Amino acid sequence: MKRVEARLDRIEGQLAELLLLLRGKKSKSEYHARYYAKRKAAQEKTAASTKLLNPDKNMLTHRDPRLRPMFESWAEVAFRFGAALKPFDFLCWLVYTWQNLYKVRPITRTGGYNQVFIGWSGDRPLRQKCTDNDVFGNCKRLKFTKSQAFDFGRSTWWNWTYGVLYQVLFTMQEEHEDRWAQLSPRFTRPLLLMTGGCGSVEVRHGIEFDQNLEHDQLQKVYKHVKPDLDRGWAACIKGLCSKEEPHAEFVNAPTE
């Protein structure tokens, strides 16, 4: 009997030690969870304080004048991607960088739809639910009906490419003409195509690509530009969805 009591005493002692150990681990885990949550909140608060307040407008159709001072630095990054012949990587990086300039992301993606910021309701962001076809105009077809051609030319992403991408490319052409001339068409052509008619890219003899071409002309040229446009739209979507800066190591690598 005494042996049984002694054994029970040892088991109780071991259980007590185990409970203390588990409580210590739980307490330590809770401390770390609170610490990292507090640090993350502080980082987000600091980042938010340096971001731009979204204008009370559709973020794709509105040209934000506060972006103008940034075009030069973005052009320098573009030249780095240009030297490496990576047009779509640059496009992905540019979209991500633009998207994360603002306190509220201009576009979020949920359930396969784009939720586009279109203004404020008090202090709450208003969003419009749009398909990829609504926003980008990207489509699997090679032929268009007249109404489809009309919709293609009025997709809202053409406004973004003119207001952001084209302004960067224009800065490269105008402010750094010699450096621009040295870039390969393998880099410049896809990016110029993404700007639609602004890019002035001749795709067939005497016909330049323009998203607003008449129905019969769009039919003739679309198959020649679709591969580059598809890759460009995919890069844009990737940039919108990225939680971390894409190609950060390449962008931040020291220059020679």
Image (cartoon, rainbow, N blue to C red):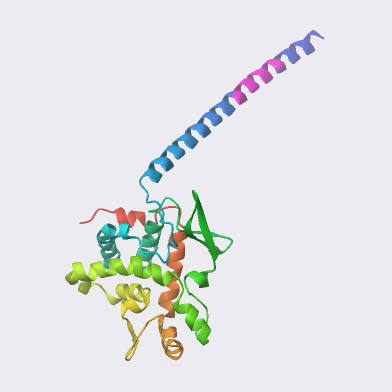
Q: Vertically, is 222 above or below 24?
A: below
Q: Is residue 129 left or right of residue 212?
A: right
* 167 shown above or below 48: below
In the rendered image, residue 68, in percent from the top left (x then y), is placed at 28, 60
Q: Can residue 87 be seen here?
A: no
Q: Is residue 43 left or right of residue 121?
A: left
Q: Quadrant of residue 64?
A: bottom left
Q: Is residue 126 left or right of residue 80?
A: right
User: Is residue 234 in the magenta section?
Assistant: no
214 vs 243, nearest the viewer? 214
Q: Position of residue 2 (x, y in %)?
A: 79, 8
Q: Residue at x 26, y 57 (%)?
A: 69
Quadrant where the N terminus is found in the figure: top right
Task: Pick the residue in front: 150 or 193.
Answer: 150
Which residue appears at 41% of the width and 72% of the height? 158
Which residue of the protein is positioned furthest toward the top in this rendering?
2
Magenta segment range?
12-23
